[in-house]
Image: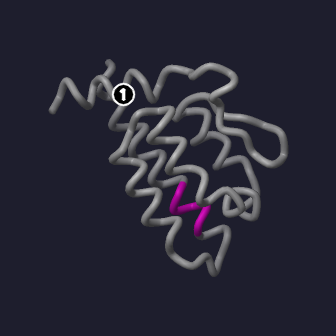
Amino acid sequence: MAKNLQTVARRALTPCAGDEAFRFADGTSARDLGDLHHAVGAKSGHLVAHHRIDYAPWVERILGDPALSRRIERLARRPVRDVEAFRHELLFLLGDRLGKLRERVL
């Protein structure tokens, strides 16, 4: 399992090709997990919530992290009553996983 997590870490922390980047409606993009975490922290709750169904497939297909994708998908399925709360929960999931993956590649 450690090697598998290390493989996931390398892929998720390495920028993908520009044409595979996550594209936000405002024209900005994210190319790795760190970029996505930063963008979610910097964007408005409305923009982040607008893309709620887009994060999980991108994380699994491009970043190669099915475990994180499942967590994001569960969060995205819940009704969004407060866009800022959603943004903060997503930011927590991304930050937690980012920390764990960065430990694996050190």
Residue 44, above or below 105: below
Crowding at mark 1 (Cα within 10 Å: few <14, some 14-19, many 20+): many
Q: Kindly identify the amino acid type of the residue bearing the numbered disc 1.
A: Ala
- Residue bearing mark 1: 9
Residue 76, above or below 102: below
Q: Residue 19 is drawn in which quadrant?
A: top right
Residue 90, above or below 99: below
Q: Residue shown at 67%/70% (left/top)?
A: 83
Q: How many marks?
A: 1
Q: Between 57 and 5, which is closer to the camera in this rendering?
A: 57
Q: Between 27 and 40, which is closer to the camera in this rendering?
A: 27
Q: Residue 45 is drawn in which quadrant?
A: bottom right
Q: Residue 88's x, y, as percent?
A: 57, 61
Residue 81, above or below 20: below
Q: Residue shown at 38%/28% (left/top)?
A: 102
Q: Residue shown at 43%/38% (left/top)?
A: 98
- Residue, far right: 26
Q: Residue 66's x, y, as percent?
A: 36, 44
Q: Residue shown at 56%/21% (left/top)?
A: 15
Q: Is residue 10 left or right of residue 62?
A: left
Q: Residue 34's x, y, as percent?
A: 55, 33
Point out the image quarter for the C terminus. top left
Which span of residues is magenta-colored? 86-90
Q: Is residue 67 left or right of residue 22?
A: left
Q: Is residue 14 located in the magenta-colored stretch of the structure?
A: no
Dot 1: element:
helix
Point out the image quarter for the N terminus. top left
Q: Residue 28 is drawn in which quadrant?
A: top right
The color scheme shown is one colour
